[in-house]
Amino acid sequence: MDLFEEIQKEKEDFPKLHSFPKKISKYKLNFYQIFAIGVFIICFFLGIILGNLFATCQPSSFYYYEACSVTEFNFSLMIAIWAIGLLLSIFIFAIGHIIVLLTDISKKLSKFRV
């Protein structure tokens, strides 16, 4: 069989905007994937809360001034927590997806066993 003919058979158009809910509703999430989404949501709010709690001092013209006169929101801490949370949730989600794929392979192989 020609490779280009096989590509033509498998080729699909880009999905339309109204077809996304149908495709998403077919996909079932396992425990690890739901846990990864929860971890990301928690890290999102945790970044905002900790960015406000551990505020930074606003730079002043006094180099050796010990007290902070004005504090600012800590954006670098918030972005760091968001990045770590995103990486952690992607890792957990990927483990869940691998488990789904291995389960499907196991089901297909069990049909061929005698």
Image (spheres, helix red, strand yellow):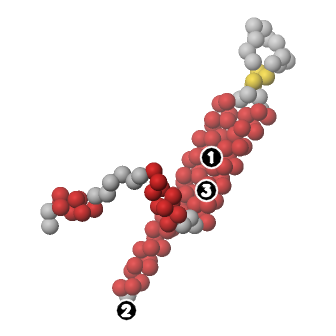
Give the image quarter of residue 106.
Answer: bottom left
Mark 1 or mark 2: whose residue is earlier in sequence? 1
Identify the residue at horizontal 79%, vertical 34% (top origin): 53
Mark 3 or mark 1: whose residue is earlier in sequence? 3
- Residue that label 1 marks: 85
From mark 2 to mark 3, how far is it between C-alphas? 38 Å
Under tag 1, what secondary structure?
Answer: helix
Q: Looking at the picture, does residue 57 appear above or below residue 95?
A: above
Identify the residue at horizontal 68%, vertical 34% (top origin): 77
Amino acid carrying label 1: it is Gly
Identify the residue at horizontal 18%, vertical 61% (top origin): 5
Quadrant where the image shows the N terminus: bottom left
Looking at the image, which is closer to me, 37 or 78? Answer: 37
Amino acid carrying label 3: it is Ala
Please state the horizontal and vertical placement of residue 76, each as a whole percent of the image.
65, 30
- Residue that label 3 marks: 36
Q: Looking at the picture, does residue 44 appear above or below residue 7?
A: above
Under tag 3, what secondary structure?
Answer: helix
Quadrant where the image shows the C terminus: bottom left
Please state the horizontal and vertical placement of residue 48, each as a whole percent of the image.
72, 38
